[in-house]
Image: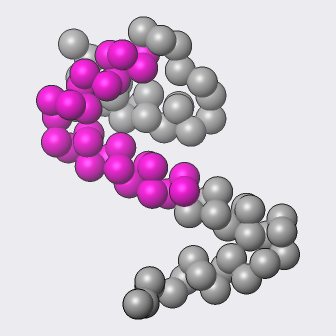
Amino acid sequence: MMNCRQATRLLSDAQERELSLMDRAALKIHVLMCSGCRNFSHQMGTLRNMIRTYAKGAKDASPGLRQLSLPESK
Ligand SMILES: [Zn+2]
């Protein structure tokens, strides 16, 4: 069982490289059992989506930035 330090290290590594199957499995198990790392994982996912959206918006020269900074209104 990995500890939280190893889990968060892997979560941030996952942003930059493909994790091995073993790493991903161990990480998944830890995140399922540890609410702290689960929150961290969600934050990482949100951050990555924001970066991806921003990069996509900039590339397409569409108003992605404006969508990113405004809360969704219905
Ligand atoms: Zn943890």
Return the residue found at the far top.
22
17 relative to 1, above or below: below
Q: Residue at 64% across / 86% down in the picture?
A: 66
How far across and how far down the image is residue 54, in percent?
A: 67, 67
- In the image, taking residue 66 as reference, residue 25 lies left or right, namely left
Q: Residue at 42% across / 9% down in the picture?
A: 22
14 relative to 3, above or below: below
- Determine if the magenta segment contains residue 1: no
Type of secondary structure dominating the magenta stretch? helix
Quadrant of the image containing the N terminus:
top left
How far across and how far down the image is residue 65, in percent?
A: 67, 79
How far across and how far down the image is residue 73, in percent?
A: 42, 90
44 relative to 15, above or below: below
Quadrant of the image containing the C terminus:
bottom left
- In the image, taking residue 25 as reference, residue 1 lies left or right, namely left
- In the image, taking residue 70 as reference, residue 23 lies left or right, namely left
- Which residue is nearer to you in this view: 52 or 17? 52
Q: Residue at 68% across / 76% down in the picture?
A: 64
- Determine if the magenta segment contains residue 26: yes
Return the residue found at the far bottom.
74
How far across and how far down the image is residue 30, in percent?
A: 24, 25
- Which residue is nearer to you in this view: 45 or 60? 60
Return the residue found at the far front.
74
> Quarter-wise, where is residue 56 in the image?
bottom right
Q: Which residues are magenta?
A: 23-49
38 relative to 6, above or below: below
> Quarter-wise, where is residue 52 in the image?
bottom right
